[in-house]
Image (cartoon, helix red, strand yellow):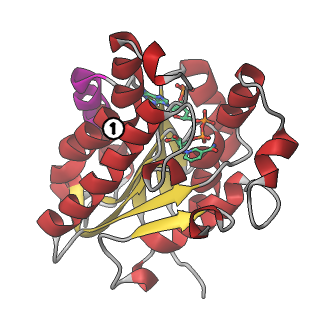
Amino acid sequence: MTTNLQGKTGVISGGTSGIGLATAKILLEKGARVIIVGRDRVKGQEAATYLGSQAAFVQADLSMVRECQKAAGAILKVTDKSTPQTRPVQRQLDFLVNCAGTYEEERPEQITEEAYERVLNNNLKSTIFLTKELLPSLAKEAAIVNVASDAGISGNYGCSLYSAAKGAVVAFTRSLALDLAPYIRVNCVCPGDVDTPLVAKQLAAGSYTKEEMAAVYPLGRIATPEEIARVIAFVLSPENSFMTGAIIPIDGGLTAK
Ligand SMILES: NC(=O)c1ccc[n+]([C@@H]2O[C@H](COP(=O)([O-])OP(=O)(O)OC[C@H]3O[C@@H](n4cnc5c(N)ncnc54)[C@H](OP(=O)(O)O)[C@@H]3O)[C@@H](O)[C@H]2O)c1
């Protein structure tokens, strides 16, 4: 099925790296304009340059509500300049991908309040408050995709904080889908391990190899960022008009076990 996003404009938090960057690239190829958000200004500007003239970067640390507010303001300034005058000023965004997030591992007895703040704020608070701040700017038939994880569906070792954050993203998605129906569709993708800088960091810090990580997957490997991005692009697209509140595993069969 072709996924046409010609003329659509939207936001990808975490669009400066990994899954978010791959998603930005695919959405641009399908005709969309994208605004990517991340913390690191240099990385963000490099990503926007790589993506080309239909992409813009907004710098913000979305773990803080005031930064979500600031980001929403900056996003509207970008869209004000680039949106055709025929679109109402208040409803310029057609999609939002909440992909910003960080991963870390710890044993339950090692959990600290600081780790709780980091993991929950980067993964959950960013999703909730960027969505809240952008809601008035979303078009009537806009679509939202939240990026959770297989860890938000089933348990795994050493990542109970991360699981709690992603499980909450899953639950947030379902309720938000009800609140925003019948107009805005809200869905959630749950990737297994994906070959991104996040996983490179995880492997560098952990006691297991990429081969050991891959061995638990029925498909015998971890995903590429593009494999997740292609699903996100389809879930967002107008062709996917009857899906809302769905939690979609993209995990090589991991959670089918
Ligand atoms: N890779 C995997 O195996 C995997 C599996 C399941 C789910 N996920 C989820 O998929 C999402 C993307 O992961 P990835 O693997 O693509 O990671 P990545 O390459 O490390 O990219 C993470 C992105 O999120 C941004 N980010 C993180 N915290 C932020 C904050 N507080 N405010 C604004 N931006 C923030 C980063 O920007 P800066 O670098 O500028 O901070 C970066 O653009 C995450 O939510 C992750 O939990 C990943």
Q: On the picture, is 192 further left or further right than 211?
A: left
- Percent position of residue 166, x then y: 40, 44
- Does the image show residue 170? yes
- Residue 70 on the magenta span: yes
Depicted 68 relative to depicted 127: above or below: above
Q: On the picture, is 120 further left or further right than 102?
A: left
- Percent position of residue 4, x then y: 53, 78
Using a 10 Å C-alpha cutoff, classify the residue at mark 1 as few (fewer than 14 neighbours), some (14 to 19) or many (20 or more).
many
- Does the image show residue 31? no
Residue range corresponding to the magenta coloring:
64-73
Ligand 1 falls in which quarter?
Answer: top right
- The residue located at (26%, 26%) in the rendering is 70
Q: Farthest residue toward the right?
A: 211
Q: Which amino acid does label 1 sit on?
A: Leu
Q: Farthest residue toward the bottom?
A: 1
- Residue with the mark numbered 1: 124
In which quarter of the view is residue 122 placed?
top left
Q: Which of 150 and 122 is in front in this view?
A: 150
- The residue located at (65%, 33%) in the rendering is 198
- Percent position of residue 152, x then y: 43, 50
Q: Which of 70 and 80 is in front in this view?
A: 70
Depicted 123 relative to depicted 235: above or below: above
Question: Principal SS element in the magenta part?
Answer: helix
Where the N terminus falls, by quadrant?
A: bottom right
Q: Which of 20 and 41 is in front in this view?
A: 20
- Percent position of residue 161, x then y: 42, 31
